[in-house]
Image (tube, helix red, strand yellow):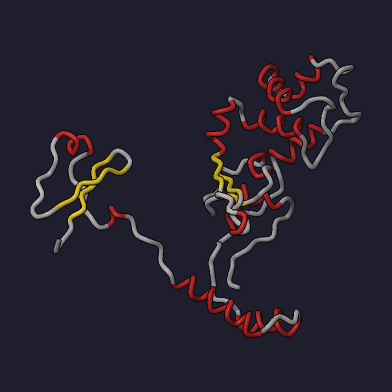
Amino acid sequence: MGVPYVEAPCEAEASCAALVKAGKVYATATEDMDGLTFGTSILMRHLTASEAKKLPIQEFHFHKLLEEIGLSHTQFVDLCILLGSDYCETIRGVGPKRAIDLIRQHGSIEEILQNIDTAKYPVPEHWLYKEARQLFLTPEVVDTDSIDLKWTEPDEPGLLEFMSTEKQFSEDRIRNGIKKIRKSRQGSTQGRLDNFFKVTGSLSSLKRKEPELKGPAKRSRNLGCHAWEIQEGK
């Protein structure tokens, strides 16, 4: 289909996070919040959700999240381990509210274990939290320096062979899909308004003294700034 892809050596979210931090892609799109635990700068949810579900796309900025909850990246990882991960068990009886209170009070799982009432909150035997933490902080990921993501034209004969001959999909349906792919790649993104005008002065000067316009004009306000729309011929 011409879509660039990479094969992750370990967790997909870990390699996606590495690609985001290296500036190769904009965000990690996943429903798994482990993307944040692996340190992706930006995470997006519901990007591939069915249109019928009408779910708004959610965008999380990791540095803002850490600022708002008042934790470091390592403390956030420990919090996620307490809340439950794919790599180890959790402390019985410690839910989300208790977990974040413990991390804020003690700063790490090691300090929590030294101060928690293990009779009330039993700790798993041979708890592998240190190994889980290491997997989140230093995961095995793709070599981002060698990655060059480029979109290419769809391989029409290859798609027809795989989808129609091998998988028995309608040939017309596949050809129509290829046409849609090619059409979407021919489109261009909408330019910004400031690309068409040369900015002179500052916003503060615009607020103090409004420019004199010749001919009919309409004044509109957008995000606290003044924009002038000249309606020619009206």
Q: Position of residue 31 (x, y in %)?
A: 67, 48
Q: Position of residue 91 (x, y in %)?
A: 83, 27
Q: How many numbered marks are there?
A: 0
Looking at the image, which residue is at 67% across and 39% down?
37
Viewed as shown, does residue 170 lie left or right of 208?
Answer: right
Image quarter of the N terminus? bottom right
Viewed as shown, does residue 123 lie left or right of 70?
Answer: right
Image quarter of the C terminus? bottom left
Looking at the image, which residue is at 58% across and 46% down?
43
Q: Nearer the viewer, residue 191 or 218?
A: 218
Q: Position of residue 83 (x, y in %)?
A: 75, 32
Report which quarter residue 160 is drawn in. Answer: bottom right
Viewed as shown, does residue 139 lie left or right of 234?
Answer: right
- Vertical side of 83 occupied by 116: above or below: above
- Vertical side of 59 occupied by 99: above or below: above
Q: Nearer the viewer, residue 141 or 180?
A: 180
Looking at the image, which residue is at 84% across and 34% down?
89
